[in-house]
Amino acid sequence: MKRIPISPPVAALLLAVILFLLSGLLPNGFGSDMDVARAQAMNILRLAVFLGVIAAGQTLVIISGSEGIDLSAGSVVTLTAILTYVIVNGADEKVLLALLVSLAAGALIGFLNGVGVTFLKISPFVMTLGMAGVVTGTIIVVNHGNVSGRVAPIMTRLIARPLSPEIPIPNALIIWLIFGILMWLLLERTTFGKNLFAIGVNRVTARLSGVDVTGMNLATYALAGALAGFGGFLVVGNTGVVLLQLGQPFLFPSIAAVAVGGTLLSGGKGSYWGTMAGAIVLTLITSLLTTMQMPESVRRMVLGGTLLILISIYGRQKSLRQ
Amino acid sequence: MAESLSARNIVKRYGGVVALSDGNLEVQAREVVALIGANGSGKSTMSKVINGVVVLDGGQLLLDGNPIHFSSPQVAKNLGIATVFQELSLIPQMTVAENIWLTREPLNALGQVDRKAVKARTEELLALFAGTFKTGLHPDSPVTSLPPDEKQIIEILKAISFDPWLVILDEATASLDSRQVQRLFELVKKWKEQGKAIIFVSHRMEEIFRIADKYSVLRNGKTVGAGDIKDINEKQLVKLMIEKESVLGFLRGEAKSDEKIEKEISLEVENLTADYVRGVSFKVRRGELLGIGGLRGQGQRHLLHSLFGDIPYTGTVKLFNTELHFKHPREAMRKGFALVPGDRAKEGLLYIRSILENLLLPSWKRYGLPLKVGNAKKEAIRVGSSLNLKMAGLEEPVSSLSGGNAQKVVIGKWLMREPQVLLLDDPTKGVDVGTKAEFYALLTRLSDEGKTILFYSSDDEELIGLCDRVLVMYDGRIRSELAEKTLTRENLIAASLGVSHGGAE
Amino acid sequence: MKQSRWDALAARQPALFALVLLVLSLIVNLILQPNMFAKDTLNSNMRVFLPIILMAVGQAIVILGGGIDISVGGIVSIVNTVLATRVGLEGSPGEMWQFVFISLLVGLLAGAINGFFIAYLRLQPIITTYATSFLYAGLALLILPNPGGGIPGSIAALYRNSTPFNLPLAFYVIAILLFVWLYLSSTRYGKFLLAVGGKAEAAYETAVPVTAVQFSTYVISGFTAALAGIAITMLSGSGNADIGNPMTLNSITAVVIGGNALSGGVGGVVGPVMGAITLGIIQNIISFASIDTWWETLVKATIIVVALAAPGIVNLFRRRRA
């Protein structure tokens, strides 16, 4: 396996910068207009926030190893977005409740994933894929076609708007930065984080060193679900509307973002900073394709192809013959 | 049939680690060459180069004088080279017959596997070892249900099923009992008459002198001696294998105090039964270095793992007269137990993580929230230097360390917690001689400090030199307890093979 | 370690469980639909089940070999869109068969791509086929952005009404496949497959051509997915780029119900075929049980999760008992 000299998150950021500069050269690009460029950059970053938060849970389960992955993230986002929409119904006082419900709902679904993976020994891919179907089915039942609700003004203020007219930094970006620091603390400065990396590398060693592997597994999937729930809360705060397919477009990119960011898909190594860089790269790719007026089909193919190329570089396993 | 195989100046690297720097071997038809070396000398790598499983980085292989290149195990197999592997190459869910004939199944006219022929030929092969099986071994038995010695026999039958000219026996006798070893050696003699060549990879002196015609000694990846067996004796062979006259020059005997202070009983085990452990009872005192001996796979590992709470068991375990029953290693850890497992890559270390993280793995809770990494680093450095750990830095991955230093990390991980009971499963396996001496000093010091130490070793010299007492396990039970005068090599070997001896209880 | 006789039997014949389930579901279906075995009803059922049965065969072989193929749904979609656009409602039967042939080649190629990345580049099967699933689904969408197109009415009618010797056409197709499988599994290839799926390193040391075997399983899976695509196009008579999406999880569930271990090396193809039929019958039962349309998605998804969880639950009890 080749040694990549630059750390993957840095490489990802470089890639993002290059892609951004390339986008400027396109017909609808910013050309040499600095103001437009800055505005566009801010917009990309703002859009990347939502993918970034949704990819946080994905980062955790992938680090936990044993082919960890969470394919229910997309449907959890949709579910919690709808729940928030309905609970808040325009009232500022209900926002905190909606947030808590979102976290709890996400955690519950994640916990069920964890149970299936840990006790029933179902592979995470299959378990979370199945769970995604159940959550979607639940949404349809709850939804019955249409929901009535509204986002509260405070949510729009905190999520969709910039800090102040003088400081044109989107609030969402600030939330993301704080979130990123908290994720770093979780992964690098708590026993949970250290144990997470441990079980990602070698569950036997972890267990023989006193780590409660079962508990960690359950906690990781539950936490991933809660984070996806938080993502859904933010997404609806940003868009103000709900759709049945609200969360689905985030799912594949969330996995690709983690991979781009250098987290090993086999587990045991990685960081959330990398995922953040990866989220920016993926948002850039999507937005580039939109600017080039490429249809959804091309977007899908590009995403699939990108992940394929990524794992061909980063994800090769030991060859049979040494 | 070929007549000879030569390996000249073989070099093999695994990543940064050099397994072989100058490996040489000459083998002719109708003879048995013993490939000898201590753990970690490169023996297994040598056999993997010869049977095509790994690619060599330098040197040459010659078949009947002509250079040859094995691009895959298939090529080697087609040339008539068969291997009985140390880590068995059997497919667990498949049956005995399926495993033996894999890739060589007799076919009928339509290209289908001829089941009758398979069954008949399997029974022919099984008959070669008739009378040495413990269970009723059928061609249709799933391999996963067999005990280790029978699995080893199937591995042997698999190797000779296609009538190879060169058979590599890589530590093939490790799991066999004495009857089975005897039968195997009878077969080896027959194979010689048939014109086959055999490479016998081992470090068991007694067997080597029984069966080998020639010898070739590997030490630290280099061939340091070769010749006829009749021209050499055991002591000279051992001298070739290890650098110093005796590693245990520092023997416990010297460091032991003359008075035997009767310390209190710390660990008491009564009728412990678990997987592969059939009712084991013993007592250990504080400050005692209790050895567990016997051939590998007789329940020693499972005994240690049960005591550590990793495997469920029935029976009574008492620590200083309080009964304990750990359900998880976490519980054992909290009561001051520590386990250094037998396979450090698979059980003892997080290979891609840093040395710091490996040392701290069980102990992060002590450093608060958020973790005070600075304090952790200080303590890690302290433990590292007390163990004389040679590393580039705490942040380096543990994979950058040599075998001996990596093992120090495994031990260091536990020493940071100051355990009172240390369980060790073959701790000096694959460790270089210098580090071995350091370990012996460490274990002696710890036991002098009043810790209770229980350790399994497959190395008889080690057990004799270090331990006050040795419990020899065979087939899941304690066969003999050897101490002081009865603690001799002959008694150890005899007990390991299940033969009872006159003398001690 | 002693095993009860039931355990030993179940271990040697994993398809037994599938047979029991099949019989049970047949009985329930018969109660709700007494004319189930009448020629027309039987034919109607079987041609609806055929696509999943075909996919289950290929998926079973991939899973036996220790891998998994998440891209099968995408391959089905490609075949469907190719047929619907290239042949169209106005096409001639000759063109149809021409493109059927081309579709099979497409399936083989898609499978070969998967096989190349997984067997030769040694990438992880789950994430690789997940990436290619996006690639293939995107391609299908590119070929046919909106549902439409179709196939000649005569062909669709042929598929619908063929009952040689009064048995559904599907029976013959399944019989041919099973015949081929029974032959294959009795050759060395069959043993190689179980060995590679059981313990690839041991198989390698035994000089089994592991890479070639793994590659072949993906090619086979691509082929059967193409067959399934042809079948479903003949069934629906029209094109839809999303047609393959729900089929992937169904094919995996069929294999799990069929008694094959998801980890590989255990099972066969007969069990998964029974599993696919069982799944189809269960969906029939749901339709007959007149469940509220809103609840249908949730119920179906829950059944899939339960089916996936069943082997794990059974093993849990077995382990507790031991």
Image (cartoon, helix red, strand yellow):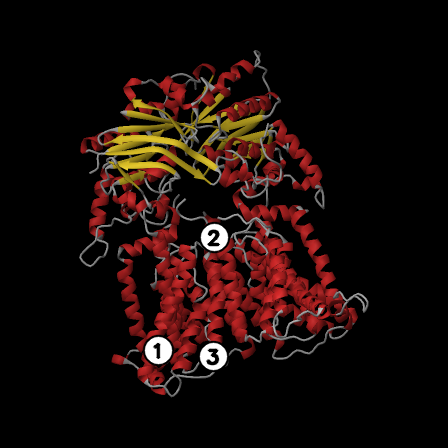
Quickly name the residue at label 2: A316
User: Pointer 2 indicates a residue of which chain?
Assistant: A
Q: Which of A321 and B36 is in front in this view?
A: A321
Badge 3 element = loop
Quickly name the residue at label 1: C99
Residue A224 visible in the snapshot: no
Q: Are marks 1 and 3 in contact (CB under 8 Å)?
A: no
Residue at mark 3 shares a chain with residue at mark 2: no
- At a point 36% along the width and 27% down the height, the residue shown is B36
Question: Looking at the image, is B401 positioned above or below residue A36?
Answer: above
Quickly name the residue at label 3: C144
User: Pointer 3 indicates a residue of which chain?
Assistant: C
Residue B403, position as x, y percentages in the image: 50, 33
Alpha carbon distance from label 3 to label 2: 34 Å
Q: Which of C22 and B393 is in front in this view?
A: B393
The kind of residue tagged 1 is Phe
| Label 2, residues with CA under 10 Å away: few <14, some 14-19, many ≥20 | many
Residue at mark 2 shares a chain with residue at mark 1: no
Residue C89, position as x, y percentages in the image: 39, 87
Alpha carbon distance from label 2 to label 1: 36 Å
> Which numbered marker is on residue B12?
none
The extreme front residue here reads A32
Question: Looking at the image, is B113 positioned above or below residue C77?
Answer: above
The kind of residue tagged 3 is Leu
The kind of residue tagged 2 is Arg
Q: Which of B73 and C77 is in front in this view?
A: B73
| Label 1, residues with CA under 10 Å away: few <14, some 14-19, many ≥20 | some
User: Pointer 1 indicates a residue of which chain?
Assistant: C
Image quadrant where residue B51 sits? top left
Alpha carbon distance from label 1 to label 3: 16 Å
Relative placement, left or right, of A144 versus B235 is right
